[in-house]
Amino acid sequence: MTITIPSTGRYVLANANVPAAVMGEPASGALVLVDIEIADGKVTSIGAAGSGLLGPDRIDLDHGIVLPAFVDLHTHLDKGHIWPRKENPDGTWLGALMAVGEDRSANWAAADVERRMDFALRCAWAHGTAAVRTHLDTAPPQHEISWDVFEAVRERWVGRIELQAAGLMGPDTILDPAALRAVATRTKAAKGLLGGSTGVHPDNPAIMRALLQVAGDFGLDVDLHIDETGDPAADALQSLADAVIETGFTGKVTAGHCCAIAIQPEATAMATIERVAQAGIAVVSLPICNMYLQDRRNVGGVRTPRWRGVTLLNELKAAGVPVAIASDNTRDPFYAYGDLDGFEVLREGARILHFDHPQADAFTWARSVSAEPAAIGGFNYSGTISARLPAELVLFRARTWTELMSRPQTDRVVLRNGAVIDTTLPDYRELDDLMGRHA
């Protein structure tokens, strides 16, 4: 699709199919045929098709779908694109954890992390992403390196991609009061979120209380990796919900992954979901990465996974829990593929999480990569399409749900502040020297 924006900066996107769910009707699955008037980089009006400007400043989209620019609420920019130098030896979660740890110790100097972060953000930008939250490995001493790099990158990307970061540490660091407060101090200075990861662990109640106590002391919101495991004994999500309720923690709390409830007894899973809703916790599912990584057990030969690896996202949403889907890892030991493409996340999410039926409601899920993560994350960018907001839009030739979901939509047009951007992706060869490859 080729679109030429008039030199006046004032034009109409005519006959655009826009999900009502991203235009102020979150429960509606309808597509609404509208004319979107844009001037000086902002949406000035949205009206029924045929109500907009006529003449040369009218760009007919011929019923093509328009979505808001994407919000990616859970990524790992510091890990991204290390696969060529550090593969996952067996495809398992533990194999990924060990491989990343080795690569971090050997290679994660500031220059290395910064170049890979910037490369990943250029991919996200080209695909049409306006806001990103990354997790940063912050077990001391990495917290000093990664936060410095993140702050520099965030400043450089102002006006293009709005960036947030959450510190990521394991149970041992959380249960070490001195280490936890050191991470919280650096996180607070960088205006970040406090985060961590835990699954099956006997001290989960203590882990959650320790984290929330320090988060409260420092005035930090929380974003955790929770129950990223296929062990039905995992109870970190339940422990988190209990801790939020019992401590009266008032900050925002986000839980990512939450895989284990999908294989727990129905009564257990539903009780946990009810408790999560009561606690006001938001849940982010990482469908592509979780399906790739969970239930791999390649010891003694190749074995096909028995379950999808994802959380009960439909049930969580039905219970009133704020939900979103996101990319997670890109080309690192936790996920060998990916490119921070918000549309790919939506497209694959429909296949993996089965939110494509009933078809009449499918477009409500357009919010899961835009308005919902924007609200959960408290971004300035709203992930919606409305008059008086900047024209941050992604335009597709596809006219219906099945047309949209059937192709990768590589011919999409991305508008940022009303202007068409160059969607050329960066070349992997740029990173060859970091991967030990030389021409």
Image: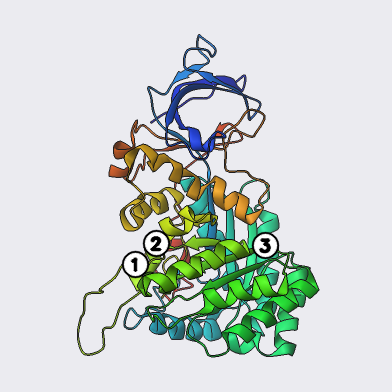
Residue 180 place in picture, x, y as percent: 70, 83
Q: Can you say whether 120 is above or below 307 in the image?
A: above
- SS assignment at label 2: helix
- Across and down, in percent, residue 303 comes to 21, 79
Q: Mark 3 points at which residue?
A: 252
Between marks 2 and 1, how big is the CA–CA gap?
A: 6 Å
- Image quadrant in which the C terminus is located: bottom left
Left or right position of 85 against 403: right
Residue type, numbered disc 2: Pro
Figure check: 289 above or below 302: above
**What's the residue at 54%, 12% (across, down)?**
53
Q: Do the residues labelled 2 and 1 touch (CB within 8 Å)?
A: yes
Vertical arrangement, residue 271 with respect to residue 95, above or below = above
Residue 122: percent from the left, percent from the top? 52, 53
In terms of secondary structure, where does tag 1 sit?
A: helix
Q: What residue type is labelled 1?
A: Met
Numbered tag placed on residue 287 in the rendering: 2
Q: Nearer the viewer, residue 197 or 315?
A: 315
